[in-house]
Amino acid sequence: MPGASEGTLLVVEDDADLRASVVDVLTSAGYRSAVAKDGLEALTWLEVHGRPSLVLLDMEMPRMDGYAFLERIARHPAWTGLTVVALTPRRVLHPAVLDTLLKPFDGHDLLERVPHWLRGSRLPGTS
């Protein structure tokens, strides 16, 4: 299983259908995943479970959006340097965001990139 040694991938997405779809794709490829429906839930998850291997972060969510989430984790020493990938319809240029996966995307695009993100890099040839 490709994800067995990778740890947990935290999917932070307010759209329940998209969140479930991402988890299904990751699980079918052998990755372990956890979910949060917004930035506040993601912070609670981090408090309880610690560092995930990767955070897939929707940037536009109610209660606490992705930008506010990034501000909060930047102030917490244990979460500094988390690998964060934005899931959004527009390119995100933020120092804490490794890459952006533009919505809409398909499972193949996601699975092609995850191994690169887990190594802290982008898929060669993407921006």
Image: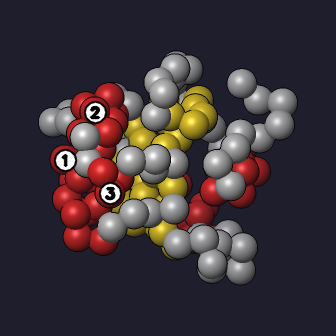
Q: Residue at (42%, 42%) from the top-left corner?
A: 57
Spatial CA distance of label 1 from label 2 is: 12 Å
Crowd around label 3: few <14 · some 14–19 · many ≥20 (10 Å): few
Looking at the rendered structure, the secondary structure element under dot 3 is helix
Q: Residue at (51%, 48%) from the top-left corner?
A: 83
Q: Could you tell me residue 73's position as x and y percent?
A: 30, 44
Q: Could you tell me residue 90's position as x and y percent?
A: 52, 19
Q: Amino acid at mark 2?
A: Glu
- Choose between 99 and 58: the one closer to the eye: 99
Furthest residue in direction front, as rendered: 77
Q: Amino acid at mark 1?
A: Leu
Q: Which mark is residue 71?
A: 2
Q: Residue at (47%, 24%) from the top-left corner?
A: 94
Answer left or right for 30 relative to 90: right
Looking at the rendered structure, the secondary structure element under dot 1 is helix
Q: Which mark is residue 79?
A: none
Decide: is 51 above or below 13.
Answer: below
